[in-house]
Image: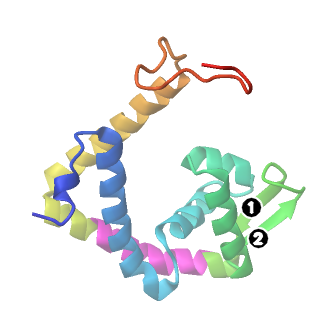
Amino acid sequence: MARSDFLDLDCLAYATRRTGRAVTNVFNARMAGFDLNVSQFGLLVAVSKMPGATLAAIGEAMLIDESTLARNFAVMERRGLIAAAGGRGRGGKHLTLTPEGKQLLVEAGGVWRAINRELARELGVEEAAAGRAFLVALGAAAERLKQQPRKEPAADKPARRRIGERA
């Protein structure tokens, strides 16, 4: 039993976040030689697939919060891996990979693919494919639910009072 198995909360959010952290830890450890973490590598890939896109468009496509995206972009720009041209702010800067960024993407991409193959072998190729399909479906379901208006108030959340209002 893993140290944190007792924390199984029978919750899809907890399970996916915990699993995400475990997978991220493996990738981060193996990518350390490139001085890249999962988020930074993902940003390299996104910019390579969306050349000229704005930071805002890439963040939307990756479902990454603004602070994480801005932090990783700043690191990658400082390292000379991503170049930004054009306007100011998230919506104005258009991103491209520099030659150094393209080279790092090629080199780190080989290791990235190898880690994916190792995890698939460890899990079983069919189970890995089923897991990826489940995660895609779970993400799509969550996006659909996010778009729906809430029908009833949360039963476990007390109603908010206005400032100065008495109970």
Where is residue 122? Give x, y as percent: 15, 66
Residue 20 is one of the magenta-drawn residues = no
Q: Report the Cα–Cα distance between label 2 and label 1.
A: 6 Å
Report if the CB atoms under discs 2 and 1 are less than 8 Å apart. Answer: yes
Instruction: Name above or below for residue 73 compared with residue 156.
Output: below
Figure check: 38 above or below 67: below
- Residue type at mark 2 is Ala
Q: Position of residue 156 (x, y in %)?
A: 41, 25
Q: Does the magenta stretch include residue 107?
A: yes
Q: In the image, residue 39 lies at what x, y percent?
A: 52, 64
Q: How many marks?
A: 2
Q: Is residue 33 visible?
A: yes
Instruction: Please tell me whether mark 2 sits on a helix, a strand or a loop.
Output: strand
For the C terminus, which image quadrant? top right
Left or right position of 153 against 167:
left
Q: Residue 34 carries which label?
A: none
Q: Position of residue 98 (x, y in %)?
A: 70, 75
What residue does disc 2 label? 83
Q: Identify which residue, 136 or 158, lies in the foreground.
A: 158
Q: Is mark 1 on a helix, strand or loop?
A: strand
Give the residue drawn at x 43%, y 79%.
31
Seen in the image, is 98 located left or right of residue 158?
right
Please state the extent of the stretch shown in magenta in the rendering: 102-116
* Residue at 35% over, 36% down: 138
* Residue 49 vs residue 32, the one in the foreground: 32
Asked if residue 150 lies left or right of residue 114, the reply is: right
Q: In which quarter of the image is residue 130?
A: top left
In this picture the colour scheme is rainbow
**Residue nearest the observer in this picture, 63 or 120:** 63
The part of the image, by quadrant, that contains residue 25 is bottom left
Give the residue number, with chain letter if any, for mark 1. Answer: 95
Spot the residue most to the front.
Answer: 166
